[in-house]
Image (tube, grey):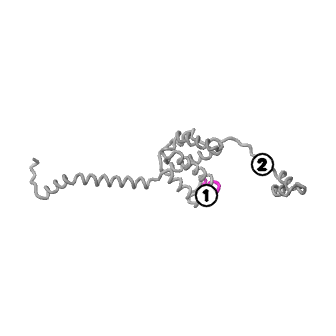
Amino acid sequence: DAGETLNREIVHEVVANITNREQKELQEAEEKKKREEEERANRVTFDKFIDKFIQEAKDGTRMNVHGKRYAAYSITNIQQSIDKFHAFEKDKGREFDFDDINMDFFYQFQEYLTNLGKAQNTVGKFINWIKTLMAFADVEGLHTNPAYRDKRFRGTRTEVDSIYLTKEDLDKIRKADLSEMPECYSLARD
């Protein structure tokens, strides 16, 4: 109809395209699925970022906001927060990724920690570390979720009464005469 002369090669190509079309479509779909699986496997999730963050903080390749190495107690605080986060994920039966960290997550995580009997300051510390990790990941371009910036998404703190002994109190205890008391009193004092 187009006025072109058909030769043997053109006819074979047209026939091959018709007969192999299903096979070609299946192959293309399989290749696409494989590419998507590779992208998913290589994508940095919130859990992968957390693991990397903690490792880098421990080995000193990640610095804090002041450009200094993280102190051991800070790494311990981060690890405690993340352990509770992973326990929360296990309790919910799912992994929370960057896009899942929103106000709904905040309220559920806060309730979970409170139900574990955690004090308000401890709950606040754990939530603030989640927020800090989200901020670091945001700066690194790993997500576009702004929900963690909501003013309500923050850990709260209450003042606590710090009970401690003064140097004078310690001297009184050290000098106390416990010679007429059972030996366990001396051991307890020491």
Report the disc number at residue 136: none
Label 1 crowd (10 A; few <14 / some 14-19 / many >=20): some
Disc 1 residue type (three-letter): Arg
Displayed quadrant of residue 189: bottom right
Residue at 53%, 50% in the rendered image = 136
Label 2 crowd (10 A; few <14 / some 14-19 / many >=20): few
Residue at 26%, 52% in the rendered image = 25
Q: Nearer the viewer, residue 19 or 164?
A: 19
Secondary structure at badge 1 equals: loop
Labels 2 and 1: the sequence-earlier one: 1
The C terminus sits in image quarter: bottom right
Disc 2 from disc 1: Cα separation = 30 Å
- Residue of label 2: 164
Location of residue 103 with respect to 69 vertically, above or below: above
Disc 2 residue type (three-letter): Tyr
Displayed quadrant of residue 179: bottom right
- Residue of label 1: 69
From this viewpoint, is residue 27 visible?
A: yes
Dominant secondary structure (helix, strand or loop) of the stretch shown in magenta: loop
Q: What is the x, y in percent for residue 21?
A: 22, 52
Q: Mark 2 and 1 residues: CB-CB less than 8 Å, in contact? A: no
Secondary structure at badge 2 equals: loop
Seen as rendered, the residue at the extreme top is 152
Q: What is the x, y in percent for residue 124?
A: 62, 44
The stretch drawn in magenta includes residue 161:
no
User: Which stretch did the figure color magenta?
Assistant: 66-74
Seen as rendered, the residue at the extreme front is 182
